[in-house]
Structure formats: structure tokens, C-alpha cells
């Protein structure tokens, strides 16, 4: 029967898949068959990261999971929680006007002013993690 076991959980930002960023981790020791209880509750930590603008992608840890035998499978007690950056669409509209005045050399009006208005609209994404 397996003895003392170590469980690890890693919280990883995979927004930049070429350079994942470890946000945090936790490690606890217990016995084979006992329920894994991390120092920081993964459910609450996930909620915390979501409040910081992260979006949960996947979580391989389920509350109630018991220590497996790492002598048979070295990765049985290793868990990953992956996040990406939450985003929201943002539309910005700017209106610009120009007035063209037509004057003679003596300053009198040659013809009525011409007012031209242009509206620019841009749509983009706001990264809720970094702003």
C-alpha cells in the first residue's frame, strides 16, 4: 500500500500559449486514499482569479479527489487550472467637424461657410486582465 503522497496544483495563465505564466501553486502532503485538501481552496482561488479578469479554461482538480498512488503513476496527484484573459468588446465613436469659410481679400463673405462632419467608429477588445 502506498504511503505518504504529495499533491500539487498549478494555476496557469495560457493567454500567451508560447509563454505560459504560472499564477500560483499549492502543495500538500497526505496519505493514499485520503481526501486532498489544499491550503488554499481551489474553488475560491478560481473565483479570485476570475475577479481579476481571468477566464477559466479548464480545471483538472475536483473537490473530494483522494490521493492516488504516485509510485504507480507519478502525475496522479498533480493538477492544473488553466486560465486565459477575459475580454469584452468595446466600441468608440468620435465625431470631427471642420468649417471652411470662403472670404474675399477684403474679408467679406464670398459664399456661406461649408461645415463637414465625419464620424469615426472603432471596435476592439478590452483585455479585462490587463486593462
Image (spheres, rainbow, N blue to C red):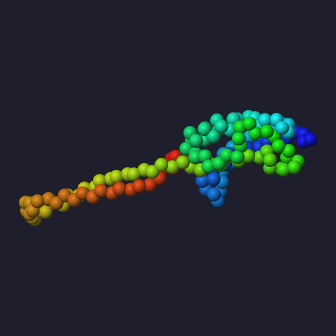
Is residue 37 visible in the rendered image? The answer is yes
Is residue 25 visible in the rendered image? The answer is no
Q: Report whether 49 appears left or right of 64.
A: left
Tally of numbered tags: 0
Q: Which of the pair 26/79 is nearer the observer?
A: 79
Q: Is residue 66 above or below residue 82?
A: above
Q: Where residue 120 sits: x, y (%)?
A: 33, 57
Determine the image quadrant of residue 35. top right
Q: Where residue 39 sits: x, y (%)?
A: 74, 34
- Point 51% across, 49% down: residue: 87
Which residue is outermost to the bottom?
105
Q: Quadrant of the N terminus?
A: top right
Q: Report whether 127 appears left or right of 36.
A: left
- Point 63% across, 53% down: residue: 14
Q: Report whether 19 appears left or right of 121.
A: right
Q: Where residue 115 sits: x, y (%)?
A: 19, 58
- Point 62% across, 49% down: residue: 57
Q: Is residue 129 above or below residue 44?
A: below
Q: Report whether 110 appears left or right of 123.
A: left
Determine the image quadrant of residue 6. top right
Q: Where residue 33 sits: x, y (%)?
A: 83, 38
- Point 29% across, 53% down: residue: 95
Which residue is outermost to the right?
1
Amino acid at each position: 500500500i502506498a504511503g505518504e503522497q504529495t499533491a500539487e496544483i498549478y494555476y496557469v495563465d495560457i493567454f500567451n500559449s508560447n509563454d505560459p505564466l504560472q499564477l500560483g501553486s499549492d502543495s500538500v502532503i497526505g496519505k493514499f486514499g485520503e481526501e486532498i485538501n489544499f491550503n488554499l481552496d481551489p474553488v475560491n482561488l478560481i473565483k479570485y482569479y476570475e475577479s481579476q479578469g481571468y477566464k477559466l479554461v479548464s480545471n483538472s482538480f475536483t473537490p473530494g479527489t483522494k490521493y492516488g498512488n504516485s509510485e504507480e503513476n507519478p502525475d496522479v496527484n498533480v493538477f492544473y487550472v488553466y486560465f486565459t484573459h477575459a475580454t469584452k468588446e468595446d466600441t468608440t465613436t468620435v465625431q470631427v467637424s471642420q468649417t471652411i469659410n470662403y472670404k474675399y481679400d477684403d474679408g467679406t463673405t464670398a459664399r456661406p461657410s461649408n461645415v463637414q462632419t465625419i464620424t469615426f467608429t472603432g471596435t476592439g477588445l478590452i483585455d479585462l486582465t490587463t486593462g
